[in-house]
Image (tube, rainbow, N blue to C red):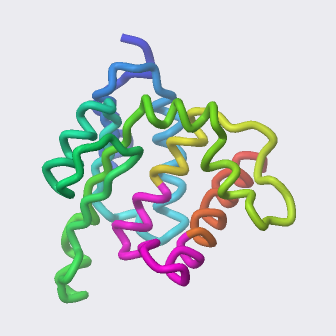
Amino acid sequence: MSETNVEPLEINESPRDLINESELDVPMRALWARVEKLYAFIGEQDSEVSIVLTTDEDIRDLNREWRDLDESTDVLSFPMREDEDPEIAKQLPLGDIAISVPTAMRYVESCHHKDRLDENAPKPLTDSWSLLDELTFLVIHATLHLLGYDHAEPEEEAIMRAKEREWMTYILESEKA
């Protein structure tokens, strides 16, 4: 088995799991490092989260079952602390994330999320956009949903987009240091 498809990836007894069910080559160790860096940065280093990398077909099944939408999507979040008392919520897992790797690959080619991050910014975050960058972005987006952020209203969307850029900037800049 190649190093890119190690599953599940559990390093240093972290409360997070990263599982590649897509059977596609994914930079698992690099993604794992970014996920751990992200959760430390946002103060959720002790939060339990499962991240499953999957296929378009499987994410479509999840979307149909949980959102009653019979279509594929890029990422789904399943928060477990929603509507809980804050004292109880901190004791619960943050939630689960499912990411379609084939969709992420298509987004790399289109630069859809890179362009969104660079929109209205003084300068581009990066000159290139890789599968690792796209998967990192999707983890960030899903994590924001797990934390209660949404983009249904323009004001909410602006806040969420600013957080996406802030967190992605932190990840990319920390790798340059």
Residue 76 lies, in percent from the top left, at 32, 52
Residue 41 lies, in percent from the top left, at 55, 65
Q: Is residue 175 left or right of residue 20?
A: right
* Camera-nearest residue between 113 and 26: 113
* Camera-nearest residue between 141 and 119: 119
Q: As drawn, which residue projects farthest toward the left?
A: 65
Task: Tell me what residue is drawn at x 18 percent, y 48 percent.
Answer: 64
Task: Tell me what residue is drawn at x 53 percent, y 32 percent.
Answer: 106
Residue 19: quadrant of the picture: top left
Task: Tell me what residue is drawn at x 26 percent, y 54 percent.
Answer: 96
Image position of 36 with respect to 5: above or below: below
Does the segment drawn in magenta span residue 145?
yes
Residue 159 lies, in percent from the top left, at 56, 78
Q: As drawn, which residue projects farthest toward the top?
A: 1
Q: Which is the main secondary structure of the residues drawn in magenta?
A: helix
Q: Is residue 85 left or right of residue 133?
A: left
Q: Is residue 15 visible?
A: no
Does the segment drawn in magenta span residue 40?
no
Image position of 158 with respect to 49: above or below: below
**Quadrant of the image containing the N terminus:** top left
Q: Is residue 91 visible?
A: yes
**Magenta segment range?**
140-160
Image position of 156 with respect to 138: above or below: below
Q: Is residue 149 left or right of residue 111?
A: left
* Camera-nearest residue between 85 and 45: 85
